[in-house]
Amino acid sequence: MQYSEMKREALLEEQVKLLKEFEALKRMNLKLDMSRGKPGADQLDLSMDLLKAVTEKEDCIAENGFDCRNYGVLDGMPECKALFAELLDVPTKNVIIGGTSSLNLMYDYIAQCMAKGVAGEKPWLMQGNVKFICNVPGYDRHFSICEYFGIEMINVPMTDEGVNIEKIRELVKDESVKGMFCVPKYSNPTGVTYTDENVRAIAALQPAAKDFRVVWDNAYIVHDLTDTPDQLLNIFEAAKEFGTEDHFVEFTSTSKISFPGAGVSAIAASDNNIAEIKERLNNETISYDKLNQLRHVRYFKNLDGIKAHMQKHAALIAPKFQAVLDGLEKEFSENRLASWTKPNGGYFISLDTTACSARRVGELCKELGVTLTTVGATYPYGKDPEDKNIRIAPSLPPVAELEKAVEVLCLCIKLATLENLV
């Protein structure tokens, strides 16, 4: 029977029963973590041989004869640029190789827009109130960059097709709307991949701001979980039709391919944007870690090598996603207390409560030793207007721990719902 259809006496009986389960779990002193999308240790083990790719003096010499132990080559070694150009399906000249973090590259790019400006326009800091479109639920780190720079964030709810293009078309008529964050493939946290029509519609936008920029965060470009992965239309190919290539700056990294915090990041952009970014980099750094670039090229070799490697990742984490989905299906398939996504890739499952406070669910889970992503973090300023979204990150814990964590999560959703009803 649905909770919403039960009489008060039955609800109280159900609550007493579940509270007994709650106290039994509390005595177990669990410590389970589904808070962030970290690869598990078994995934990290897959890349250990990468560390052996550059060990001798002779290994440090690039294809063009450059000694990678020294300063120089600001935008990345040619062979590493070629690897990322193949991955992103763009010309090599339109790639810049960065350090270990694509988040760092995104932060630096927004800082460049704020302090220096782009497209010959005044720095954003000199233009008054600057606004950004934030597709929600979304990635908390994108929001924190905006918040740090004092950029006003405008929530636009995601759809099953990608961004809400009708809403965005209206918003970009405002010249103070300077940009938008997107995770176009296996979006964080919904797992949605933008349809071809959605990508073309984004490419076709004609914003009032001449310095409008879309941060195209293609973090999960090869992070597929099935043999029938989602396909994402190349944003630069789509933009050519409308002459809007300058609107887009694409970012990616090997953080969840090789080693988080020790991978390689990259930018892909138009000729104009590449030139502006290089001008800033000339004043920001001498060069990034070229030995790490060589390690990755020597280990992966090409796109086929990356894809083969990612199939090994999928074999390890797909069962973890399935464990979460099976647990949710078992508890909620018939009682409509929650809804959730079933992604083909990426690192997250997005769960929405339907009859209780997600924040209260988070409090109850914490009491039982299960750590979730901070409830509300998937919205700007940490404020979910409907207090319903919970981001689940299945990759780090072993399957047995995930099964227990989902059991706890489901119990807490039921208890929070009963609190509301009783």
Image (cartoon, helix red, strand yellow):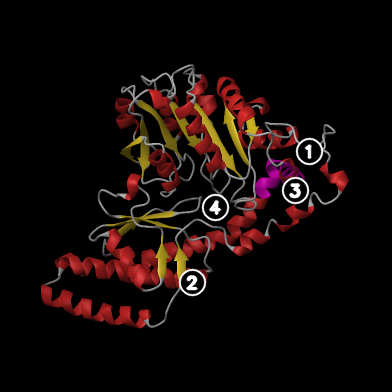
Look at the numbered disc 4 and give the secondary structure of its residue: loop
In primary-sequence order, the first of circles 3 and 1 is 1
Mark 3: few/some/many CA within 10 Å (<14, 14-19, 20+): some
The image position of residue 197, as x and y in percent, is 42, 31
Mark 2: few/some/many CA within 10 Å (<14, 14-19, 20+): some
Instruction: Name the residue carrying label 3.
Output: 299
Look at the numbered disc 1 and give the secondary structure of its residue: loop
Q: Residue at image x 33%, y 28%?
A: 129
**Image quadrant for the N terminus?**
bottom left
Instruction: Name the residue carrying label 2.
Output: 401
Q: Is residue 239 above or below residue 267?
A: above
* 169, 373: nearer the viewer: 373
Q: What residue type is labelled 1?
A: Asn
Magenta span has 309? no
The image position of residue 344, as x and y in percent, is 49, 50
Instruction: Name the residue carrying label 1.
Output: 70
Distance in Å between CA atoms under marks 3 and 2 = 32 Å
In primary-sequence order, the first of circles 1 and 2 is 1
Provide the residue span drawn in magenta: 293-308
Distance in Å between CA atoms under marks 4 and 3 = 24 Å
Instruction: Name the residue carrying label 4.
Output: 226
In primary-sequence order, the first of circles 3 and 2 is 3
